[in-house]
Amino acid sequence: MAAMSSSSPPAEPGGRSIFLLGRSLGIGGAERQMVQLAVGLQARGYQVTVGLFYCGGALDRELTGRDIPIIDLGKRSRWDVAGFLLRLVRALREVRPDVVYAFLGTANTVAAAVRPFVPRSRLLWSIRASNMDLDHYDWASRLSYRIECALSGSPDLIVSNSRAGADHAVAHGFPRERIVVVPNGIDTSRFRPEEALRREARARWGLADDEIAVGVLARIDPMKDHPNFLAAAAAVAARRPEVRFLCIGEGPEDYRRKLEAQAAAAGIADRVIWPGPTADPVPALNGLDIVCSSSSEGEGFSNAVAEAMACGRPCVVTDVGDSAFVVGDTGHSVPPRDPEALAAALLRALDELGTDAGARARARVVEQFSADRMVERTIACFRPDG
């Protein structure tokens, strides 16, 4: 276990010492929320420590740059269990947190396993997805979720970032009386319209001034349903020759090749751009004219959608998780796995460019889904009566 950047003082009264437990801080929605929460808690005077299964992620520096200590739990492999748990117990006993807040399935399970060693700490779980089809994932992922369900009575409180996620968890045996909904929070001072960033992104993608960019910003994963987006893109391309389509994110190379083959078969290979992952989504979102979420499952609260809205970008989403709720009347939502409906909604959004749709989208995020509101709602969960 790597040493902390400084020795941790005893927990302050009133639940001021918080230990956030996660797998890693690679690029991802849950990871960004974990960073956002850590920074927000520190700004309010909380003593925050972050424990990670694996260090070295792209977002680590956002914490170290603010002197938020990270403990590297040094998990070596899937089978490194006993040693890993021992390192975590040692870390928790050193920090003596008032609250242990675990992010996502594996961290939830691990936190429940070590709870007997820190019985005075309040335990919170975070659940951040809904209606996931585990048939798309390996046996270890399926087993992990079954274990998580079986242990769901262990935490004092379970924080879901969406209503859909809470309902899905209850349907799989999670105790409803212990679940609260805290929507994700967006840093609207960072995610905002910026014309200079728009020009830079479009130049990097090789777009002409008169070309319109419609894109998905998400990892390339079956649940994000890029085939749905590409099928809709083909229908839109036939009507709107000035539109270019972007799939921004990373994923398995073999899966991406299948998607590229789909685009080629549909005759739109030259209209689709694959920029790869982005460590900072703000320039990419500013570079797009319309942001699409084509997911078929698994969404809870979509950070990409809310961040796009904060950047003043209208969104077209599938009605998965809370995406339709987040968009409200500022964009369009359609059923999942329906490329014809998705194409029709994209065409409507294209017709609406130049209206106040983008400004209304940003206003909705500022009013309802700000980072400050997320942090304050989470702090309420730290209290025994939360």
Image: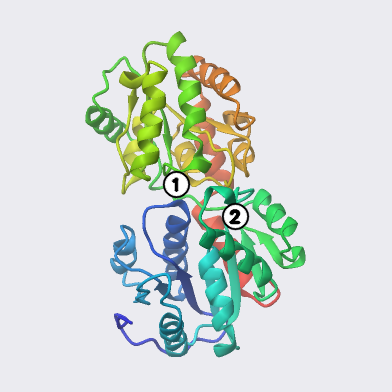
The image quadrant that residue 83 belongs to is bottom left
Q: Is residue 177 left or right of residue 379?
A: right
Residue 135 position, x and y percent, is 58, 49
Q: Quadrant of the N terminus?
A: bottom left
Q: Residue at x 45, y 33 (%)?
A: 312
Few, some or many residues within 10 Å of mark 2 (<14, 14–19, 20+): many
Q: Nearer the viewer, mark 1 or mark 2?
A: 2
Q: Residue at x 41, y 77 (%)?
A: 80
Asked which secondary structure carries label 1, the reply is loop
Residue 117, above or below 239: below
Few, some or many residues within 10 Å of mark 1 (<14, 14–19, 20+): many
Q: Determine which residue is flagged by label 2.
A: 161
Q: Quadrant of the C terminus?
A: bottom right
Residue 378 position, x and y percent, is 58, 65
Residue 108 position, x and y percent, is 56, 70
Q: Amino acid at mark 2?
A: Asn
The Cα atoms of the two marked residues, 1 and 2, are separated by 18 Å
Residue 100 can be seen, yes or no? no
Q: Determine which residue is flagged by label 1.
A: 188
